[in-house]
Image (tube, helix red, strand yellow):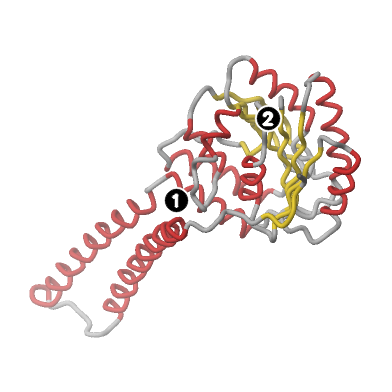
Amino acid sequence: MDLSIIIPIYNEEGNIDKLFSRLNQVIQKLNLKEVEYIFINDGSKDRSLELIKTLAKRESSVKYINLSRNFGHQIAVSAGLDNSKGDAVVIIDADLQDPPELIENLYRKLREGNEVVYAKRRSRQGEGAMKKFTAKLFYRILRNVTAINIPVDTGDFRIIDRKIVDVLKNMPEQQKFLRGQISWIGFNQTFVEYDRDERYAGKTGYTYKKMARLALDGITSFSNFPLKFATIAGFVVSGISFFMILYALYSRFISKDYEPGWTSLMLAVLFIGGIQLIGIGIIGEYISRMSANIRNRPLYIIQEKTT
């Protein structure tokens, strides 16, 4: 198998046929002997699965995996990676924001001796100012707090060599952040710049809540900065409290300039209590992730797939 193309699907009935048509045109230009298209239905509520099955009956190169429920984008991609056979693997979303035509350049760069070629966004069309701002902020924060070099302004649209896929299959953590894992693996990595298009049809399944969860997965999976922050905050608060104690003693016994009451006491208690809760919350987040990995439940459950 020369190439596997992994396509996670969640309510993308308006994009599937158009996406496959454009992908097929690109693959014909590459003159590859054997290619497989792996559609992963991640609990879609529309006609996506029906369309994929119809496509699989018509095209022998099309395969599908139907998950038992919605497990999330990163898990769906992981299911595709686990079931891929290609010497190279492309990951692309179905919304057509990432142009399939770029695969030709990605594949050419891979054949030049690289193991990973990711697509880096120059611009993002059809997205609101808030989403652009939060995405830009997230990538810069992630770059500064992690010990590995995770490229900014990139998603999961990329091509990777089989050796990368084999390593990813041996990384069993439950909270998947694939672009971080791929960066952590290393090898020769480069990029191709492009302008991201508007979504062709339908609505994005990536809500702000899911984006926040992905950001949290990225930071906690590849950085201990939040734990360091809790420690530093503890020292800072202890220092402030120490000076407040000295000031209170000075006011009470030397300057005699004080007002008996509870205001300063309440401020100190609430401030210190807030920092403590932040620290406990951060530690709890790490512990919950450790617990999830210790339970070692399967990442996903396949309801049906092509044989």
Would you call the spot at circle 1 few (<14 residues within 10 Å), some (14-19), or many (20 or more)? many
Q: Which amino acid does label 2 sit on?
A: Gly
Position in image of residue 253 (x %, y %): 8, 76
Q: Residue at x 75, y 23 (%)?
A: 104
Position in image of residue 161 (x %, y %): 60, 27
Using the image, tell me which numbered label, if any, was put on residue 86: 2
Vertical order, 75 against 282 (above or below): above
As helix, strand or loop, the secondary structure at mark 2 comes to loop
State the separation of the CA atoms marked 2 and 1: 31 Å
Using the image, tell me which numbered label, if any, was put on residue 220: 1
Which comes before the other along the chain, label 2 or label 1?
2
Callout in the foreground (2, 1): 2
Would you call the spot at circle 2 few (<14 residues within 10 Å), some (14-19), or many (20 or more)? some
Q: Which amino acid does label 1 sit on?
A: Thr
Using the image, tell me which numbered label, if any, was put on residue 304: none
Vertical order, 242 against 54 (above or below): below
Left or right: 253 in relation to 59:
left
Left or right: 53 in relation to 108:
right
